[in-house]
């Protein structure tokens, strides 16, 4: 007889909950970074512990029973509570605990990592800094994240504090040799599919090129621009170092797109021990971005930008 008090393995509960939530063993396996077979075995193990089936299985699908649906909701709530408890323990573990900072991948690669020594100095050499590359919604307690840097292109969850530290400006960037002809190859990216359309709308510029190269990630399109493969849309913060070194130029300048980068944290952790880190990092970010002003344009371009037909926010 199965025991009423002995808990099944956590791995089996996670596999079961993910399978019910996704309605698919394969999708659950991808989320948990396991094989389909490992997830199936974990679910079978849980059924063995409970003494009854949780799914109606066919050659094409696994359908949770009504009992499994209710159990999956309870397991999900329990897992969330466990993650929250672990996050609280991490936050109160003492001054030697690492500071975990999640940052959007392209900003991390192209702007933050080159300034990592200055950020470490700001928070103090006695505290370890751990960087996590991620984008979109931040699950602070679930993933053990203390602070996060995101563009404000999604809704904030309740209980999240967000403070902006730099406004976003976008514009075409390329190698100097391509600056005279921006009708060549346009570099697009799946993570910001509307970047060229946004710039064209904000700058009142028609796109005429029909040649394009498409990349999966934004940093790949910017690296392709550095390599001379074409013209990319470059957010100023992400191309500032290349503009300063002369590797890239911005022949049409930049326009403000109305978005910004912001530092985020659980509101419950500010102020306090986590609040000290939040305000320290925020002050450093604002100081480090203080010189991120759009560079001056060539005279001819500047005259076009001062035309009454140009929209607001042009710089």
Image (cartoon, helix red, strand yellow):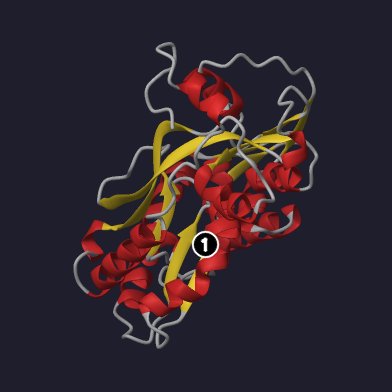
Identify the residue at horizontal 58%, vertical 29% (top origin). Answer: 252
Instruction: Locate the C terminus by quadrant.
Output: top left
Image spot of residue 190 (x, y percent): 65, 35
Is residue 2 visible to the viewer in this orientation of the structure?
no
Is residue 270 visible to the viewer in this orientation of the structure?
yes
Vertical side of 95 occupied by 6: above or below? above
Residue 286: name its quadrant. Answer: bottom left
Vertical side of 32 occupied by 61: above or below? above
Identify the residue at horizontal 77%, vertical 38% (top origin). Answer: 177
Identify the residue at horizontal 50%, vertical 49% (top origin). Answer: 237
Q: Nearer the viewer, residue 173 or 127?
A: 173
Secondary structure at badge 1 equals helix
Going by the image, does 271 lie left or right of 138?
A: left
Image spot of residue 126 (x, y percent): 40, 88
Identify the residue at horizontal 58%, vertical 54% (top origin). Answer: 244
Residue 109: name its quadrant. Answer: bottom right
Q: Which residue is mark 1?
A: 112
Badge 1: how crowded within 10 Å, few (<14), some, or many (20+)? Answer: many
Image spot of residue 276 (x, y percent): 25, 72
Q: Nearer the viewer, residue 228 or 277?
A: 228
């Amino acid at each position: 007889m199965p025991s009423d008090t002995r808990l099944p393995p956590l791995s089996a509960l996670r596999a079961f909950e993910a399978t019910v939530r996704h309605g698919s063993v394969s999708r659950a396996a991808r989320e948990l970074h396991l094989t389909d077979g490992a997830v199936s075995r974990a679910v079978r193990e849980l059924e063995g512990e409970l003494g009854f089936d949780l799914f109606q299985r066919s050659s094409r699908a696994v359908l949770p029973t009504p009992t499994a649906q209710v159990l999956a909701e309870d397991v999900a709530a329990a897992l969330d509570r466990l993650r929250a408890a672990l996050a609280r323990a991490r936050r109160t573990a003492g001054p030697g605990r690492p500071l975990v900072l999640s940052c959007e991948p392209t900003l991390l690669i192209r702007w933050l990592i080159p300034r990592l020594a200055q950020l470490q100095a700001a928070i103090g050499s006695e505290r370890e800094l751990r960087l996590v590359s991620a984008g979109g919604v931040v699950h602070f307690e679930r993933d053990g994240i203390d602070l996060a840097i995101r563009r404000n292109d999604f809704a904030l969850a309740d209980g999240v504090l967000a403070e902006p530290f730099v406004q976003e400006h976008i514009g075409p960037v390329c190698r100097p040799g391509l600056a005279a002809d921006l009708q060549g190859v346009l570099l697009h990216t799946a993570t910001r599919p509307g970047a060229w359309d946004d710039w064209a709308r904000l700058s009142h510029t028609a796109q005429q090129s029909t040649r394009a190269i498409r990349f999966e990630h934004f940093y790949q399109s910017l690296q392709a621009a550095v390599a001379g493969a074409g013209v990319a849309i470059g957010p100023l913060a992400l191309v500032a170092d290349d503009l300063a070194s002369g590797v890239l130029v911005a022949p049409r300048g930049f326009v403000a797109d109305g978005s910004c980068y912001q530092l985020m944290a659980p509101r419950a952790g500010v102020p306090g021990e986590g609040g000290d880190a939040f305000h320290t990092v925020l002050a450093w970010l604002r100081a480090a971005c203080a010189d991120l002003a759009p560079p001056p344009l060539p005279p001819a371009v500047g005259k076009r930008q001062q035309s009454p037909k140009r929209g607001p926010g042009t710089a």
